Amino acid sequence: MAAQFGRRLYRGAATTAVAAAAVAALSASQAPGSPLVAADGEQPAAGATTPGAGSGDGSVSGDSPYYTDLPPLNTPEKTDTSANLPVTGSAESGIPASVLAAYKKAERTVAGTDAACRLPWQLLAAIGKVESGQARGGKVDAQGTTLTPILGPALNGQGFALIKDTDNGAYDGDREHDRAVGPMQFIPSTWEVWGQDGNGDGRKDPNNIYDAALAAGRYLCAGSRDLSTATDLDRAVLSYNHSDEYLRTVRSWFEYYNRGTHEVPDGTGVLPSGPTSRDPGSGSSHVGGGPSKSPSPTPSPKPGGSTKPQTPSKPSPEPSAPGDLGKPTSPTPTPAPTPSETVTGLRNAGTGALTATAGDPFAERIKVRAHNGLGGAVAKTSVTFEVTGDTDATFAGGGKTATVATGTDGTATAPVLEAGEKTGEFTVLATATGTSLAPVTYTATVTARQADALARTGTEELTALAGETFEDITVAAAYKGEAADRVAVTATMITGGLLPVENDKGPYLTDDNGDPVRGIVLTTDADGKLTLPKIYADGPAGTYKLRLTAEGGAELVIELTVEERTASAAS
């Protein structure tokens, strides 16, 4: 495949200078010493777990075909460092609007939970270009879902990985073997682990560019990768598709998009026209659509001949040196971690009691410490914090998970934990990402909003003739001198005496259905105030009691006087 790659690189080069520029552009995308073999046991990013067996040797797409077209030699001028992109430019540098928006949204979302990864949207664009031609030129609907499915070939072991069906055809329509699916070409078993809801519609759809781009971003950020470094970026790309040619192709598009790009309308993107890595005669890398066939340098098969894909050559384990694409170079070996760098466990790093009132942030931050077999601190360990249980509590920003790397002292501190409206206990787990080490468990408690004082806003006596209604009653709730908003207050008509109970006679309120009740639960407004429903004067003349009790223990008793209705009043 190296020869094929070289032919595409120099296509159209009219002079030695142009050819040299092409090699320079490619070598610029490959930092010296960047490995071409990803480390074993790649670890998942926030919100995911390590893919299991049957996921194409850990790759996203099961190493199915991809476009090997390289960018034009006349790369766009590099834009400024602002987020504003030029609105015009070469056709090849244009990215369909919805596809570009999905890449940028994924970059922002990942930065909110795993800022240390430094995921650039241009890397997603490079992979999206190689995997699906930017979702076949941006043929997506308003929600970002492809108009027709993009499916890879059956992963039946004949030229590709052998992956038996894992989803009963739910994603790829194939109940015998898995196929790569969607704009970023996830195989079903990998999508089941890494799938995301990138557009907030409540679904994780591999055919949706927003969902697929976010899933790809989290996959690329697995463990403690920092994609601003060449080594980690190469490992990430190789974990996506374990091929040195794949890495070189993605790297070239990554460098190209870093030099500048612009937005084009959906459906008008430029599709690759060159061959794919697995089938040199086909211009489409995936079943379900793509560019038309380009001429093949090999003879066409005879009628009746085998239509099986050719078995690919074994990928070279090292990158080729710039200017000598066919000869592998010796990689710099990745040193094995020393015992002092190996995490053998996590422990609580002094986290105090985790309690908060509904709707408030927890004052205490969760801290965990990674240690080695001798009890020493281990830095740069990826720790995933996860909120579990029946709760609507989240970390700052709204996520249920967050990934943080330990510092030089071995500690990692989770983002601020924010209580929701559900009260009760829930659990937060801290796990060494991608390992089987026992997690550290923290119990957190959300208490109801409270009031320690209740008072009427008026002082006039409350009197009403039998059969009529009392004046409106308004009370104010406070907690530690401040207005207590959204606090539950129970209003109950009670009897007198030392042990009052609910009174089944006298004044009453009505519920939402208009039915008479003598007990009801209400909630204060944002200012801590509460106006009770109309109270009807019923029963024999006399004095009755209304008791108000707030969460937190505040109590107020109000007297209601029912006067006998006279004949003159009745008339």
Image: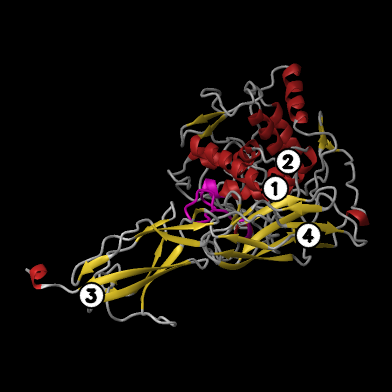
Say what amino acid the circle numbered 2 marks.
Answer: Leu
Q: Is residue 209 magenta?
A: yes
Q: Let me know if residue 207 appears in the view.
A: yes
Say what amino acid the circle numbered 4 marks.
Answer: Gly
Q: What's drawn in magenta, residue-wise?
A: 193-211
Find the distance from the CA under tag 2 to the CA under tag 3.
74 Å
Quadrant containing the N terminus in the rendered view: top right
Q: Let me know if residue 510 appears in the view.
A: no
Contact between marks 2 and 1 (CB within 8 A): the answer is: yes
Rendered image quadrant of residue 358: bottom right
The secondary element bearing badge 2 is classed as: loop
Task: Give the camera-side residue of 183 and 120.
Answer: 120
Main SS of residues in magenta: loop
Find the distance from the CA under tag 4 to the CA under tag 1.
29 Å
Is residue 17 left or right of 516 when viewed as pictured? Answer: right
Q: Which residue is mark 3?
A: 538
Give the class, few, some or many, for how many residues have Cα within 10 Å of label 4's Cα (few <14, many ≥20).
few
Q: Which residue is mark 4?
A: 350
